[in-house]
Amino acid sequence: MTPALEAAYAEPHRRYHTRAHIEACLDALAAVPDLSGSERRVLTWALWWHDAVYDPTRGDNEEASAALAERDLPGLGATPGETRWVARLILLTKGHTVEPADRLGALMVSIDLAILGADPAAYDAYARAVRQEYAHVPTEAFRAGRARVLRAFLDAPVLYPDPSFRDRLEARARANLAREIAALEA
């Protein structure tokens, strides 16, 4: 990790989108079998940079994070192709949708959303941390907006485009989302 990334993930407004989130993502990646060395390297870089820019008042965090990766990675030995690949993977985390044959994209999105399928206590801690990151948003507006975002996830045919993540986490993620939506709308 670069000093700039270390500083970014330690910004005081972050509660969930911290280095701990990145480390959890990297742990999930480490458990994925059958990746080539270059695939693993590209996914590692994409995970490190995917939330490098995180400002809850902005709508272009993913684009800014991808641009930062494009700026930083050549200095770390990434080829132009790897750098483009990383930027593309980062941009997938904006809408969390991937094309059916995009294995690395499916892994990137699934890893980023793994928290949704965590045990209820870990999920609840995540939800509280997200609320803290959006402390500037009035309660009623946050509740309505958060419920809308979670409902979009819940309404999707699948949350996890990677089959392994889907098999392990989909049912619990859907239960967590439904539970949080019910609490937000109560």
Image: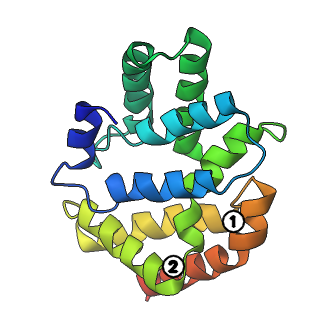
Residue at 53% in and 39% down: 44
The residue where tag 1 is placed is 155
Q: Image quadrant for the N terminus?
A: top left
The residue where tag 2 is placed is 181
Residue 168, placed above or below residue 9: below
Q: Position of residue 155 (x, y in %)?
A: 69, 65
Residue at 58% in and 63% down: 114
User: What secondary structure is marked by label 1?
Assistant: helix
Using residue 19 as the reference point, say whether residue 3 is left or right of it: left
Q: Image quadrant for the C terminus?
A: bottom left
Q: Which amino acid does the dot numbered 1 rest on?
A: Asp
Q: Which amino acid does the dot numbered 2 rest on?
A: Ile
Residue at 77% in and 36% down: 102
Dot 2 crowding, Cα within 10 Å, few <14, some 14–19, many 20+:
many
The quadrant where residue 23 appears = bottom left
Q: Are marks 2 and 1 in contact (CB under 8 Å)?
A: no
User: What secondary structure is marked by label 2?
Assistant: helix
Q: Position of residue 150 (x, y in %)?
A: 54, 67
Residue at 42% in and 80% down: 124
One can see residue 17 in this view: no
